[in-house]
Amino acid sequence: MAQHPTQIDPKDFRRALGMFATGVTIVTTQAADGTPVGITANSFNSVSLQPPMVLWSLAKNARSLAAFSEAEYWNVHILSNEQEPLSNRFARAGEDKFAGLTLDQADNGMPLLPGCSARFQCRTAFRYEGGDHIIFVGEVLAYDSSGLPPLLYVTGNYALAARKAAPISTDPAADTSQALYSENLIGYLLGRAHYQFMGGFRNRLKERALSDADFFVLSTLSVQAPLSASALAEHVSYTGIDIGPLALGSLCERALLDQTDVGLYQLSPSGRDLVLHVLAAAKAVEADLVGRMGEAEAALLRNLLKQAIGATDPGLPKLWSA
């Protein structure tokens, strides 16, 4: 590990501090004239349980310093993972950060933002000098928690949190680090997760006499239609299944697809009804999965899968595009 230099470089010091993951908060108060004031901060921390106290810090050159220094009350909002745009809004200067926002009623009268993982309504207890920052310590007068997964910040980027998974091997103590084929192979994990997930509603596909290829075609056309045979094949090419004229013709014969005058394919009313029933079963499997994993882990899973898709995308057409 690299040792810190004798002379501290502020930018390098900030990068080193960035290795410590933190939550993301918005702290709000009111100026003397009643104008709402808010700022994004990740310096929030707990101080005491008895009495309940928290702290956060604000740069001495912050435009909102006077408002917070004069205010008796302020609120801390721990942002949920869906509130990244709100974090960005309150991190910018020179705009009405509260424009268009619907606020909740706060006991201390300060602006209270909805949709957060947790919120703390505070009264200023102490203020301390902290180098180029002022440290605000507050007594917590009221708080609430929603259970929504929190937004994190680490190494200069937003992040999500999840519990570390246990081994999935039969023997948790087994050492697979030297195995030719181990449970940590990403391809194995992705493949097994895919087939186990589809296993939850594959009976529904069998009941409707739908092959995987049929399901992929119908699902694609439920998002974007009409499409040509070549466009459909391109959209579904990531599956490795060849979507040819025979497969499309069979779906037309079963009255699940309609073909337009110019040779494009779209769902028939029967096809749309079938897709709705199958997707309802798939969504039920997803809801059960999310219930077992937890909302935070499910959000992280979606994020990581999107990253994996982006990193391996050979240039497939965008399905959810205008």
Image (cartoon, helix red, strand yellow):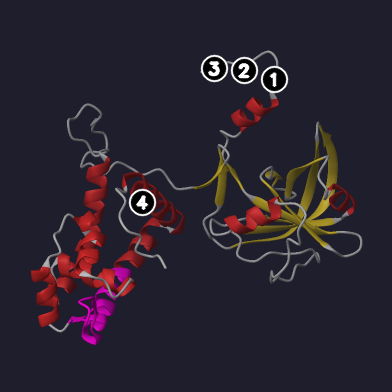
Q: Residues within 10 Å of mark 1 (few under 14, many from 20)?
A: few
| Residue at mark 3 | 2
Name which residue lies at 87% across and 55% down: 71
Tell me which label, 1 or 4, sits earlier in the chain: 1
The kind of residue on which mark 4 rests is: Leu
Magenta region: 256-284
- Looking at this view, name the residue that lies furthest to the front: 262
The kind of residue on which mark 2 rests is: His
Q: What element carries label 4?
A: helix
Q: Are marks 2 and 1 in contact (CB under 8 Å)?
A: yes
Please tell me the numbered disc located at residue 8: 1
Q: Is residue 200 visible?
A: no
Cα gap from disc 3 to disc 1, whole angstroms: 13 Å
| Residue at mark 4 | 305
The kind of residue on which mark 1 rests is: Ile
Q: Do the residues labelled 1 and 4 touch (CB within 8 Å)?
A: no
Q: Do the residues labelled 3 and 2 touch (CB within 8 Å)?
A: yes
Q: Is mark 3 on a helix, strand or loop?
A: loop
The front one of 41 and 12 is 12
231 shown above or below 132: below
Cα gap from disc 4 to disc 3, whole angstroms: 33 Å
Tell me which label, 2 or 4, sits earlier in the chain: 2
Q: Nearer the viewer, mark 2 or mark 4?
A: 4
Tell me which label, 3 or 1, sits earlier in the chain: 3
